[in-house]
Image (cartoon, rainbow, N blue to C red):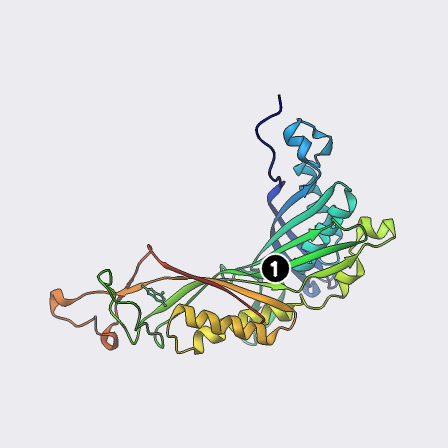
Amino acid sequence: MSEEFVLANARYGKDKVRVLRVVRSGNEDDKAGRHHTVVEYNVTVLLEGEIETSYTKADNSVVVATDSMKNITYYLAKVSPHILSPERFAMHLGTHIVSKYAHIKKAFITVEQLRWSRIVIGPNGQPHGHSFVRDGEDKRLVNVEIDGTSPSTLLATVTSGLTDLLVLKSTNSSFDSFVRDEYTTLPEVDDRIFSTSVDLSYVFSKLEIPLPKDEKLLELLVPESIAEGSVWDEEVKERTRRATLDVFAEDDSASVQATLYKMAGRILKENAGIDSVSYALPNKHYIPVDMRYIDVDNLTPAKAEVFTPLSAPSGLISATVKRK
Ligand SMILES: O=c1[nH]c(=O)c2[nH]c(=O)[nH]c2[nH]1
């Protein structure tokens, strides 16, 4: 009798592979001249392909162990010339796995990069050669999908962005003219605090990577097209973070929705290689304290100076903006 169910989809892999990589570029013999760069990544590797029988027939012959995925991640962290760019490293990892295992058709690589910024020392602000500071809880987040279903090329979809960028502005934010009915208790305000924790992601135009013929190259390094690709350069990261902060600070905000749309538009204007931009912006409410108990006006927007953060609930405003 045939079973009454089938495997609808399957994807598996390793999560939270934590890696810190030191890149040494100065004169190591001279303690004072040592110049290092560090990156810290949390990597997720997930695979799809001809792996059904591992679920349906207990057939482990199709299983690349998740432990091996962890080992490949460490190995490429050691040898990849792309380690300092999370986008390129993720592409290297994904293309390496899909081209090495014929029955693995797709790789989904996520790289979360934690902040380690160079410490600036002394009165003249000298960047230190090998000391770093966690100067923010925001993270860079990169998702790469490598599609190896076609025989001669790999198709890469690269999504990049940031999470947990906490911002607050203390004026130039209003919210009025919204629906008023029997459920409405929120007063209209021409001035309020606007605070959010920015989650931003943007999708680059798809990239075709021709499979290199040289086995060695495939084994060890990335296809040239990744190395040459310039669209993932640091400048894009800097421009998108800058656009987010600039627009947030400068906009005379009519709502989170309206500010979000302007941020996304600026990113699309400034970055030709980006096809669409998504934001998720929690509206982290700060409520003026009602001080009428002591006959003090702290509620009129212009007089509101003491606020209390509302940990929950928060609004959650999200949208994707794309080119026409
Ligand atoms: O900018 C805002 N957008 C909303 O949709 C909303 N809803 C709400 O209660 N406050 C706000 N603020």
Is residue 45 placed above or below 160 in the rendered structure?
A: above
Give the residue pinned by disc 1: 159
Residue at figure coordinates x 64%, y 73% from the top left: 272
Q: Position of residue 233 (x, y in %)?
A: 67, 67
Left or right of residue 81: residue 168 = left
Q: Total label count?
A: 1
Q: Quick check: is the Cβ at mark 1 less than 8 Å away from ligand 1?
A: no
| Residue 93 locus on image (x, y percent) | 71, 51
Query: Can residue 238 be seen here?
Result: yes
Asked if residue 245 can be seen in this view, the reply is no
Amino acid type of the residue that numbered disc 1 sits on in the rendered structure = Thr
Q: Nearer the viewer, residue 243 or 208?
A: 208
- Residue in the foreground of this view, choosing between 82 and 206: 206
* Image quadrant occupied by the C terminus: bottom right
Residue closest to the far right: 214
Name the foreground residue: 187 vs 283: 187
Indicate the quadrant where residue 11 lies: top right
293 shown above or below 108: below
80 versus 7 height, above or below: below
- Judged from the image, the secondary structure of the residue bearing numbered disc 1 is strand
Q: Which quarter of the rendering shows the N terminus? A: top right
